[in-house]
Image (spheres, grey):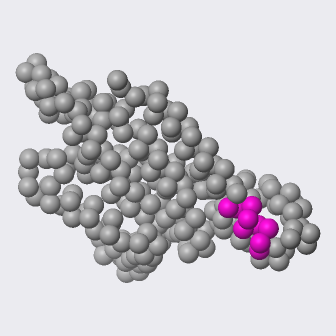
């Protein structure tokens, strides 16, 4: 079955695949995850706010983005952001946003909806007695959240946050629709150039599997170490 396969194409393209493709994939994953977690935490706090308007805005944001396909959201931001920027700045022409900026904004905002639900569960898991005790000590709301609630929420939800980041790592392959060269895009270019689609796509699938599987096992180890009796 594999007698006609040319696996040398992998060794010949090794540097390009990882130097250009994987570097971009990891960079996009890290930036989008960092922004998404921060924004998701803010949205989670809005959903738990006693002010109804904030609750409704946050709930609408989460429900909207979680109900849409990611690839559709990518197209939305890529084609609409230039015109939104034109409308905001009053420019005569659409703003130049760029494929990378569009992809980063899309993934950060999209993943923020999922990170928000994770953080909301973590915040709600903090015993109410600790919050009451902190308020009894004279702490203000931002002090209670910053010193008591959020550190515990992050600690308990860290495995879930990392698991969602693994999902984000896999989803970054969708940037091919914007003609951005991520790892899968680099593998596709090599495959079409050398006419070795099967070999390159098998290799790309193997790399994604190894990285995701290894990261999942690390998350399990971290979860066991961070478990609270």
- In the rendered image, residue 200 lying in the magenta stretch gets the answer yes
The secondary structure that most of the magenta stretch takes on is: helix
Q: Is residue 140 above or below residue 119?
A: above
Question: What span is colored magenta in the figure?
Answer: 197-205
Q: Quadrant of the C terminus?
A: top left
In the picture, residue 228 is in which quadrant? top left
In the picture, residue 143 is in which quadrant? top left
Residue 151 location (% of width, % of height): 31, 30
Residue 63 location (% of width, % of height): 26, 64
Q: Is residue 193 visible?
A: no
Q: Is residue 76 above or below residue 202?
A: below
Q: Which sits in the foreground, 222 or 191? A: 222
Residue 86 location (% of width, % of height): 35, 75
Q: Residue at x 70, y 61 (%)?
A: 204
- In the rendered image, residue 22 lying in the magenta stretch gets the answer no
Q: Is residue 203 visible?
A: yes
Left or right of 97? Residue 143 is left
Q: Is residue 185 above or below residue 113?
A: below
């Amino acid at each position: 079955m594999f007698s006609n396969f040319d696996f040398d194409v992998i060794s010949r393209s090794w540097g390009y695949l990882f130097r250009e493709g994987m570097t971009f994939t990891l960079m996009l994953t890290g930036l989008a995850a960092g922004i998404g977690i921060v924004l998701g935490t803010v949205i989670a706090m809005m959903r738990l706010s006693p002010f109804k308007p904030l609750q409704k805005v946050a709930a609408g944001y989460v429900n909207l983005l979680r109900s849409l396909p990611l690839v559709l959201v990518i197209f939305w931001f890529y084609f609409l952001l230039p015109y939104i920027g034109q409308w905001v700045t009053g420019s005569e022409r659409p703003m130049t946003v760029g494929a990378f900026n569009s992809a980063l904004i899309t993934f950060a905002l999209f993943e923020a909806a999922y990170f928000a639900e994770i953080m909301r569960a973590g915040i709600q898991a903090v015993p109410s007695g600790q919050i009451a005790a902190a308020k009894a000590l004279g702490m203000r709301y931002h002090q209670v959240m910053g010193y008591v609630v959020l550190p515990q929420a992050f600690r308990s939800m860290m495995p879930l946050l990392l698991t969602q980041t693994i999902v984000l790592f896999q989803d970054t392959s969708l940037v091919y629709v914007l003609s951005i060269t991520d790892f899968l895009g680099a593998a596709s270019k090599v495959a079409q150039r050398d006419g070795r689609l099967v070999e390159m796509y098998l290799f790309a699938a193997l790399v994604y599997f190894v990285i995701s599987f290894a990261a999942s096992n690390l998350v399990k180890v971290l979860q066991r170490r961070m478990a609270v009796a």
